[in-house]
Image: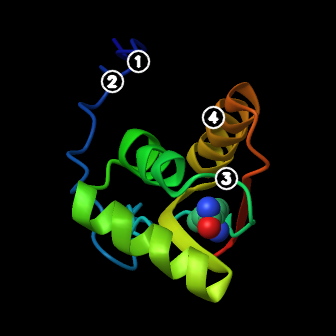
Amino acid sequence: MPDDTPPPPKPPKAVPPPERGQGAVVAERKTAKTEPPRMFQVVLLNDDYTPMEFVVMVLQEYFKRDLETATQIMLKVHKEGRGVCGVYTKDVAATKVELVLTAARRGGHPLQCIMEAA
Ligand code: TYC
């Protein structure tokens, strides 16, 4: 009597893991390239009315300069017309300009402070 039962399913062939060039998915390790942030310098401008002591205080208080450095920067602004207080990221520089101008206006001084791309 003929046996018409279908043959049992063959066991799946063991598939070797793909290698390079045979359909393998290779995760490329790209070096993360994050550009450093643009930097901005905060600059004090000279005027004839703001007291030297106030400018030195500003440099100590808002730019964390010690008394000697603050005095040197103030004198540079006084003699040359402008001087860099510090270099910061955009938001930090903008905040410092605002704080300096607010303090100056509160004290009734015409001190000018600006930021510019470093
Ligand atoms: N020129 C000012 C004075 O003789 C002093 C001064 C220094 C003002 C720096 C502003 O950013 C300044 N009193």
Q: Position of residue 2 (x, y in %)?
A: 37, 17
Q: Position of residue 27 (x, y in %)?
A: 38, 61
Q: Closer to the observer: label 1 or label 3? A: 3
Q: Which mark is residue 50?
A: 3
Comes first in the chain, label 4 or label 2: 2
> In what quadrant of the picture does the C terminus appear?
bottom right
Q: Closer to the observer: label 2 or label 1? A: 2
Q: Which mark is residue 99?
A: 4
Q: Quadrant of residue 6?
A: top left
Q: Which mark is residue 9?
A: 2
Comes first in the chain, label 2 or label 3: 2
- Give the quadrant of ligand 1: bottom right
Does mark 2 have its CB less than 8 Å from ligand 1? no
* Residue topped by disc 1: 6
Q: Quadrant of residue 79?
A: bottom right
Question: Label 4: how many residues lie within 10 Å, few (<14), some (14-19) or many (20+)?
Answer: some
